[in-house]
């Protein structure tokens, strides 16, 4: 029996990248740069929490259902955060644009250590006659994630759930990130299995597009004989581990051992020894949840596994 294609997807926030400093602290710092002062980080944190909750209730899914789009939605959150703190003062006109830019780029976030180089190394191991390797992002987020990842120098594909794309552009380039499934586009958030199913659908589309681009016009998805080994890496147990498991994916949890206290059928990455992927993740049914200290550790382990199996 042939080896399976590998579909490896990551959560974004907290797994691939994290804020350089706490969000409220960055909000407060930018506001002061714009000339707004007289409040502490704790004040900003409380006001932001209330503003986010209010805007979410009024316009769910970052405003997409209301037709306003994420930038306008976040502008409303920013204004609702600072207006109570500014009192009668007019908010600086550059406050919202500066914060929007910061949190759409590496200005506000840091990429998890080793991710860029390890992803490239991992993808470079893919050979024409080897099982396919597709790397994606499945995240509860608006549509800023591709821009954030691109700002770190990662090569990000335009293949995104719910968005038209040029097949030639998707198939004709080498990417570090091959596809994106964001709750903003899907309309469903983790742990709902539909966001995981959408990622697998996108991966199948990519297989078809790549097959057509390589002039194998007679190959269709139905004729693919190598099934997916689906791995999902995230840092929240309920959304990532439970959601992935229920959707038929194999979860890899990134976090401290204490975060999984009382959970069963979990193995630490450093306790797996030389066990191969096919042994750890059998074709029939799910096996176990793996816990790792960091995303870097996961990628280092998978790079070795993939090199050995190919």
Image (cartoon, rainbow, N blue to C red):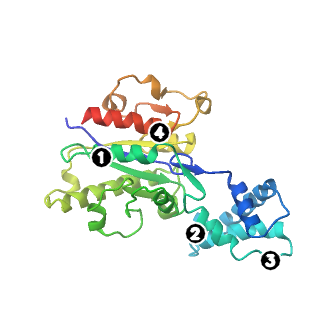
Q: Callout 4: helix, strand or loop? A: helix
Q: Are marks 1 and 2 in contact (CB under 8 Å)?
A: no
Q: Is residue 53 visible?
A: no
Q: Callout 3: helix, strand or loop? A: loop
What residue do we see at 68% from left, 55% from top? 23
Q: Position of residue 99 (x, y in %)?
A: 65, 66
Q: Is residue 272 visible?
A: yes
Label located before the other in sequence (2 or 4): 2
Q: Callout 2: helix, strand or loop? A: helix
Q: Which residue is mark 3?
A: 90
Q: In the drawing, does residue 12 fall left or right of residue 282? A: right
C-alpha distance separating marks 4 and 1: 17 Å
Label located before the other in sequence (4 or 1): 1
Q: Position of residue 96 (x, y in %)?
A: 67, 71
Q: Which residue is mark 1?
A: 124
What residue do we see at 26% from left, 47% from top? 132
Which numbered tag is attached to residue 296?
4
- Quarter of the figure that contains the C terminus: top left
C-alpha distance separating marks 2 and 4: 30 Å
């Amino acid at each position: 029996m042939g080896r399976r294609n590998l579909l490896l997807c990551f959560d974004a926030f907290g797994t691939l990248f994290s804020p350089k400093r706490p969000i409220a602290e960055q909000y407060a710092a930018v506001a002061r740069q714009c000339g707004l002062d007289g409040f502490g980080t704790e004040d900003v944190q409380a006001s932001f929490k209330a503003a986010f909750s209010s805007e979410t209730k009024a316009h769910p899914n970052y405003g997409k259902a209301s037709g306003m789009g994420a930038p306008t939605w976040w502008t409303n959150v920013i204004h609702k955060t600072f207006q109570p703190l500014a009192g009668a003062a007019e908010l600086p006109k550059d406050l919202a644009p500066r914060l929007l830019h910061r949190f759409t780029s590496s200005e506000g976030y840091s990429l998890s250590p080793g991710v860029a180089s390890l992803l490239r190394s991992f993808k470079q191991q893919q050979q024409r006659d080897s099982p396919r390797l597709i790397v994606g992002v499945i995240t509860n987020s608006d549509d800023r994630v591709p821009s954030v990842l691109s700002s770190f120098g990662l090569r990000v594909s335009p293949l995104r759930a719910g968005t038209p794309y040029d097949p030639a552009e998707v198939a004709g380039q080498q990417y570090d990130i091959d596809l994106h499934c964001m709750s903003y586009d899907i309309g469903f958030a983790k742990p709902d299995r539909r966001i995981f199913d959408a990622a697998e659908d996108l991966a199948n589309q990519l297989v078809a597009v790549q097959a057509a681009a390589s002039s194998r016009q007679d190959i269709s998805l139905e004729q693919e004989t190598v099934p997916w080994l689906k791995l999902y890496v995230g840092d929240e147990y309920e959304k990532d581990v439970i959601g992935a498991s229920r959707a038929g994916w194999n979860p890899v949890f990134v976090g401290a051992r204490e975060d999984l206290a009382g959970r069963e059928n979990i193995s630490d990455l450093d306790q797996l020894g030389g066990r191969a992927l096919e042994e750890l993740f059998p074709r029939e049914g799910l096996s176990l949840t793996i816990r790792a200290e960091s995303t870097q550790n996961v990628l280092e382990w998978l790079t070795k596994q993939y090199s050995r199996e190919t």
